[in-house]
Image (cartoon, coloured by chain):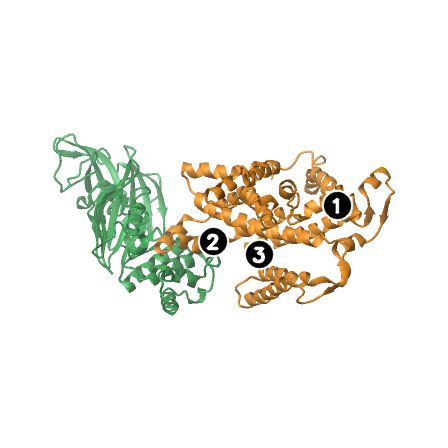
Amino acid sequence: MSGVTLENVIKTYGDVQVIHGIDLQVENGEFCVFVGPSGCGKSTLMRMVAGLEETTSGQITIGGRDVTRLDPSQRGVAMVFQTYALYPHMTVAENMGFGLRMNGVPKDQITTKVAEAARILKLDPLLDRKPKALSGGQRQRVAIGRTIVRGPEVFLFDEPLSNLDAELRVDMRVEIAALHKQLGATMIYVTHDQVEAMTLADKIVVLRDGRVEQVGAPLDLYRDPDNRFVAGFIGSPAMNFLGGQVAAGALSIPALPGAPALPVGLPPDDTRIEFGIRPEHVRIDPDGHGFRLDLIEKLGGISYAYLYATTGERLIVAEDGETTLSGDTDVGIRFDPARAFLFDAKTGKRLR
Amino acid sequence: MPEHQGSRRALSQRQAALILLLPFMAVYGLFLVYPFFKGVWISLHDWNLMAVAFNPDAKTYVGLRNYERVMWGRDITWGALANPGFQIVGFLGMVASYLLYRSGRAGRVTALAMGIAALLLFVLPGFHPDAGGRWFDRRFWPTVGNTILFVGLAVPGVTVTAMLLAAALDGETRAKAVLRTLFFLSQVLSVTVVTLIWQIMFSPRQGLIANLTELFGGSPVVWLTAEGFAMAAIVIATIWWSLGIAMILFLAGLQDISKDLYEAGALDNATGAKAFWHITLPNLKRTITVVVVLQIILHFQVFGQSHLMTNGGPNDTTQVLVRYIYQTAFRDSELGRASAMAVFLFVIMGAFSILQFVLGRETEE
């Protein structure tokens, strides 16, 4: 088992550069999640680690070994594909043992390793079936089993749960987390779902347009985002943003009359800013004014209230599940200024 | 569904189906079903083409005697080792198909088809005329043998060549697209053009192949009139001619294989020839079955190549069934006997059609 290091890694397709010099260190045994909106390059980056995409320039090392120009099978990685990519003509056992077979491992050793992996994933009763006869979740398990049998230095998961239904996705998420605990292996996991990222990761890498926006532990990204993109991407429902600017050395936010005093250094006058606050850090003040409560989504344990400021900007507030508020009323809001963030509207940078 | 106004005019589903099917059924019946049964009927008569054309009553019902005249002989006996080469292979084939089925390596239908083929190979060559006996028609069975030999050479030839070509030309580069078109182009030529091209190719004086053999110091082969080479020559021309459709079918089959499988294969150390053997071939199984059966049905009807390139010669080595039927009917005017042979050919092709149908259903399970 060993870590993965990327140094100034670049990928271009013809004239188009899609990965712009990424530096990244994934520690030994770490669960690292690449997250970002579609087209951000997260899958491409993982496929470069796997060797399925050529690295245009830069260096990739796995366990201190430079693998940048090696074949995929030489890199000591195993991958779970979004489509599972099980060989349809082979049984579950043959699928799981295929990699070892191709590497000339003796038959009895393969059988032992397949049985071991099948035991971990509770696949024993399915070993003689073909993939066609399995459910989505079972196929996913076989795909994971195939990687375990290979005994790689690094496990790669390319959006492994996006073909499963919602309920199964939660189950498999828990299983993958348990598997990581059990194997203690280095894992890289690609997803566009920030909930998966938050729940699974030791380290999250937020990507946008082929660049790293921020790297950190899930809660660090939640508490202390570096920029507006990360702030908006991590957390569900997303952070609320209200536009404003600096005037005469003070904040002016049209949606929030009586400008709040935030513990941040303000930029010069006339800088346009964005004020950010998470739904869970706002409370509704039923006696206040300034917002129209449009509707309430009651999810049971929690309710989301949709508020509209006089400026037309929308604000989501997480309220108690048993809230007695009702739609179409005039309300105000309360929040702790220490929980609010301020971003430069132009650069998206956090103002601290 | 909206309710129909004036439902008195509306057709029931059954009526509509009947009306829409009618044109097809009429044409199908007139040009396929009726001629087929007419053919079977003719095969039961002593029917001289010329005589019946001038006098419709100049035919006599003879029952199955035409079949006997074509396929049987005087003092025919059967021996388990009359033709040891084929019969031993057939016997081993029966044993093999049983063992494959028992060990679960072959499906029920596949094993059954293999077993029947092996059984026929064991039984049919065992028939032979006793001392003093003889076949009524000495040319029929050798002609059937030639046809089977032709099919046995052309079908694997076309299948393997087309599959390798498809594997090589599967991709999105412009060169591959151009080559795909080029290789398909031969398919659109008519048999007369194809045979003309290959007659020139095989010509011992100015032909390309003769030129090549001379270039390497060999003496040119007289392909079309040398007994060992004539069949090879028409098989080569046929492979070149009918490559296109098989290649297109294989290309379609290749596109159906998910690219992810090859990526998974790359991670599992299966690339290049290993990937072809372990990933491409097993996933092409269905396409291979379709191509093989379609080609068998197609090539049993070979006529033009033999008729135009070699005239069935030399010494009848390229005489094939359809050409023999044609000659019996239109040169010898023996329409009844020709029809009996045609019915025999129909039975063979019908068997392969059923096989294709059954295999198609089996793989869908």
Left or right? Give the position of B116 relative to A19: right
Q: CA distance from mark 2 to mark 3?
A: 18 Å
Amino acid type, mark 3: Glu
Circle 2 crowding by C-alpha within 10 Å: few under 14, some 14–19, many from 20 = some
The chain to which mark 2 is attached is B
Q: Describe the element under mark 1 as helix, strand or loop.
A: helix
Task: For marks 2 and 1, give the one nearer the viewer.
Answer: 1
Image height of A40 relative to B118, above or below: above
Chain letter, colour green: A
Q: Nearer the viewer, residue B89 or A166?
A: B89
Image height of A147 relative to A215, above or below: below
On the image, the x and y values in percent for residue B121 come to: 64, 61
Chain letter, colour orange: B
Q: Is residue A24 visible?
A: yes
Whether tag 2 and tag 1 are in contact, CB under 8 A, the answer is no
Q: CA distance from mark 2 to mark 1?
A: 44 Å
Q: CA distance from mark 3 to mark 1?
A: 40 Å
Whether tag 2 and tag 3 are in contact, CB under 8 A, the answer is no
Q: Earlier in the sequence, mark 2 or mark 1?
A: 2
Residue B328 numbered tag: 1
Q: Earlier in the sequence, mark 3 or mark 1?
A: 1
Q: Describe the element under mark 3 as helix, strand or loop.
A: helix
Residue beneath disc 2: B281
Q: Nearer the viewer, residue B284 or A210?
A: B284
On the image, the x and y values in percent for residue A186 come to: 26, 58
On the image, the x and y values in percent for residue B323 come to: 69, 45
Q: Describe the element under mark 2 as helix, strand or loop.
A: helix
The chain to which mark 1 is attached is B
On the image, the x and y values in percent for residue A1 come to: 25, 61
Residue beneath disc 3: B362
